Image (cartoon, helix red, strand yellow):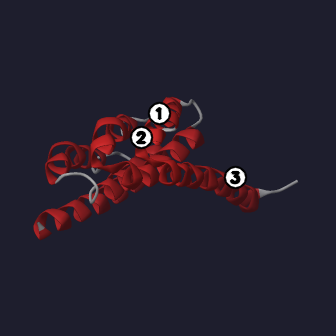
Amino acid sequence: MLKGSLAYFLVYSIRDAAANNVKRLAEEFGPDWAMQHIVPQVLDMINNPHYLHRMTILHAISLLAPVMGPEITCSKLLPEVINASKDRVPNIKFNVAKVLQSLIPIVDQSVVEKTIRPCLVELSEDPDVDVRFFATQALQSSDQVMMSS
């Protein structure tokens, strides 16, 4: 029987491979196909009761967004990430901050200002130290993007 960190690593590797396979399928068959066959199923799973499944979906969203482009990211993916910022599990919330940080270069600056930054500001005031750390890091990234444009 596997114990401790090795078992955790194997489970993580499987979730990571699943998210990467979703991305590869979207790249291979294109955004239209992915919008029809992948995105709805991925978004259905964002409310899974098991937090590790929700984390896998957040990871998949971060990988799908560059493939899907800014329009689908803003209309379909981003709202689900914002909703996930209200999750009760700190690991989900700090992964939301990481995903939002990864979306900053993909979406329009106005989306960063009106949607992403307010969510990150809220997360930066979370009771959990890790959530605050990753939210603050993502806010710094958004500041850099806004200063460079």
Secondary structure of the residue carrying tag 1 is helix
| Residue denoted by label 2 | 32
Disc 3: CA contacts within 10 A as few (<14), some (14-19) or many (>=20): few
Disc on res. 36: 1
Residue type indicated by callout 1: Gln
Q: Position of residue 140 (x, y in %)?
A: 23, 64
Q: Amino acid at mark 3?
A: Val
Which residue corresponds to the image point at 45% horizontal and 48% vertical from the top-left? 30
Lower sequence index among marks 2 and 3:
3
Residue 127 position within the rendered picture, expressed as x and y whole percent measured from the top left: 35, 45
Secondary structure under tag 3 reads: helix
Q: Is residue 57 above or below residue 133?
A: above
| Front disc: 2 or 3 | 2
Work out whether residue 108 can be spotted: yes
Q: Quadrant for the C terminus, please.
A: bottom left
Q: Nearer the viewer, residue 89 or 81?
A: 81
For mark 1, does the 10 Å Cα neighbourhood hold few (<14), some (14 to 19), or many (20 or more) residues? few
Mark number, residue 11? 3
How far apart marks 1 and 3 lie (CA) works out to 28 Å
Residue at x 55% of width, y 50% of height: 25
Mark earlier in primary sequence (1, 3) = 3
Query: Quarter-wise, where is residue 102 in the image?
Result: bottom left
- Tags 1 and 2 touching, CB below 8 Å: yes
Q: Is residue 94 visible?
A: no
Judging from the image, what secondary structure is the residue with disc 2 in? helix
Q: Nearer the viewer's eye, disc 1 or disc 3?
A: 1
